[in-house]
Amino acid sequence: MTEARGLDALPGELMMWVLIVSELMVFGAGLTAMLAMRLTDPASFAAAQEHLFQTGAALNTVVLITSGFLAAQALAWRRAARRMAARAALAGAAALGVLFLWIKGAEYAAKAADGIGWDSHPFFTFYYGLTGFHAAHVAAGIVLLLLVAWRDAPQNIEAGAMFWHMVDLVWVLLYPVVYLLG
Amino acid sequence: MKYATQKIALAYFSVALALFAIQIVGGLLVGYVYIDPNFLSEVLPFNILRMLHTNSLVVWLLLGFFGAAYFLIPEETEREIHSLMLAYLQLIILVVGTIGVVLTYVFNLFEGNFLLGKEGREFLEQPKWVKAGIVVAALIFLYNVTMTVLKGRKTAISNVLLLGLWGLALLFLFAFYNPENLALDKQYWWYVIHLWVEGVWELIMASILAYLMLKLTGVDREVVEKWLYVIVALALFSGILGTGHHYYWIGTPGYWQWIGSIFSSLEVVPFFAMMAFAFVMVWKGRRDHPNKAALLWSLGCATLAFFGAGVWGFLHTLHGVNYYTHGTQITAAHGHLAFYGAYVCLNIAIFTYAMPILRNRDPYNQVLNMAAFWLMSGGMAFMTFTLTFAGTVQTHMQRVLGEYYMDVQDQLDIFYVMRFFSGVAVFIGVLLLIYALAWPRREVITDDASVPAE
């Protein structure tokens, strides 16, 4: 057998890599556009950002990274033929995903109660757009994690974990730029 | 021809070519109206001519896709088409519907009639009975090809083609919803036309291109399939939310400006991938296929689609740019090269590949066919450039300096004249092409009287 080269050398499913790169391009473009808009009016962007619930976002970062750890652990356990442990880890990762969405939902509810909508300020258009689009990926990821916990072939778990790490990674990019930068 | 039912494709391709000729005549007339605005204004007003030009384009492309499916699905599935009779019935319904539409447009028959009359829309304008006929024809078609695929070998090419064709038919259903509100009418119209040309048609395009590459270059199916899946994923990922680039100024919420800008910018990627795919396959390919013209059209398709749909699309897709260029001749430039590159060239590539096989002869008249390629593609490229310059001048005078629309139009006259003559070049190319594809049966046409005429 010849040594794998080029795209064949990538671990996991090629299509998942195509998806991951595409998602990073979309979120990267969104963040870049937001920063470019911010340059045109830094003061009012900073003022709008003051309204965000930064503690909740920090908590969510911890939740999501822990969840990502569990997904990675699930793959290792599955490869070591510990199927039940792997399934439990996937269920745990999915449960933390639900917790993430619950905290995010509370954050959105608080914004709505303050009368802040997507068109209150350009900052909030990006805030709702980027975090909302990310939350939709979290929801999809939860379904995917449960699906691979059920059909638990190692390559399935690998694909699920790859998707979930992409969701993690995107959050880690969003969190500083949307919540902290100022 | 390995399978007898592939013959169906010949009927579809012939009708498609006839409609293509009509479309180009329509284009010439519309192009001439730009030079001489009162030309035919009583008999065939501009809006009717324009509708004929665009709608006959869509219909002949669809007939070409159907024909392509009937041609390649037997080879891919290694089965005869499920029903020959249904395939011809489908064609008859489509032809009757098309004639019905044209007569209703031109003579405005049955004004105001719910079932038979026009709907009074700018786009998706067919009488209800024709719309229903299109759905019946689509159902017949889907039944026919799906049954064939289910019984036979399943390949990535036939699966992707089927996915594209199902999507095409299902999305057409939005044409039945005709809301009072003009903004909503536009919104749903894009569900049909955008999700066609920047969504499911790309799947059809990628699968037909993959089939042609497989046949013409002899590259392994495994390699072709990997490319095909990646292209399909990229097309759907960018194309679906890319619909947002039509929602900038029609009254839809402002977040569409960002969603549309970001996703539609990425629509360049699948077109680039298709171009890379075609060229890499040719470089890797070991086969020296005699049908050089089909290869030329395939490569031309991938290249001009990248420029027309990809580059010229990106040119005005960002909402900050589109704020100024919306609805100027920039749009017309993009529309012409995108449709020509992506879908016209694709159809002609499969016609050029299939027609000699269907007519049971070697691929003769390659030189004439290739001359037609260069004449048509050169004409379309020139037209795209003149319209791009016209659009740039128009954008500046009308949108930046704020001059009156008709005053600006007077200034664009020189571009419209050049556009008309590039259209004439395309028309001559089309005539050459149709002759090369449909007429000669012998390599050398002789004037020897002892040889019977065709």
Image (cartoon, coloured by chain):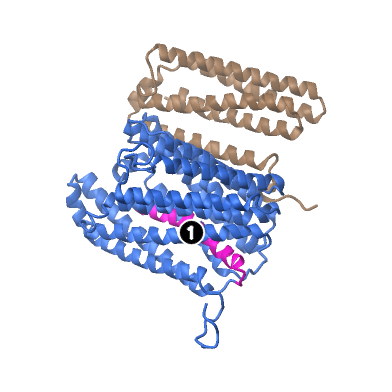
Chain colours: A brown, B blue
Looking at the image, which is closer to me, B244 or A173?
B244
Looking at the image, which is closer to me, B39 or B264?
B39
B89 is within the stretch colored magenta: no
The region drawn magenta spans B333-362
Task: From this view, report whether residue B318 is shown above or below residue A125.
Answer: below
Whole-percent x and y of residue B237? 53, 39
Q: Residues within 10 Å of mark 1 (few under 14, many from 20)?
A: some
Which residue is the extreme one toward the right?
A81
Q: What is the number of callouts on the image?
A: 1
What chain is tagged by disc 1? Answer: B
Tell me which amino acid carries mark 1. Answer: Val
Tell me what residue is drawn at x 30 percent, y 57 percent: B30
B353 is within the stretch colored magenta: yes
Look at the image and tell me whether residue A75 can be seen: yes
Residue B18 is left or right of residue A77, and the answer is: left
Residue B389 is left or right of residue B80, and the answer is: left
Whole-percent x and y of residue B189? 40, 38
Whole-percent x and y of residue B57? 42, 53
Task: From this view, report whether residue A47 is shown above or below residue B28.
Answer: above
Looking at the image, which is closer to me, B39 or B304?
B39
Looking at the image, which is closer to me, B355 or A135?
B355
Look at the image and tell me whether residue B330 can be seen: no
Main SS category, magenta section: helix
Instruction: Please tell me whether mark 1 sits on a helix, a strand or a loop.
Output: helix
User: Label 1 belongs to which residue?
Assistant: B15
Tell me what residue is drawn at x 63 percent, y 41 percent: A15
Tell me what residue is drawn at x 58 percent, y 51 percent: B87
Whole-percent x and y of residue B11? 54, 59
Q: Quadrant of the N terminus of chain B?
A: bottom right
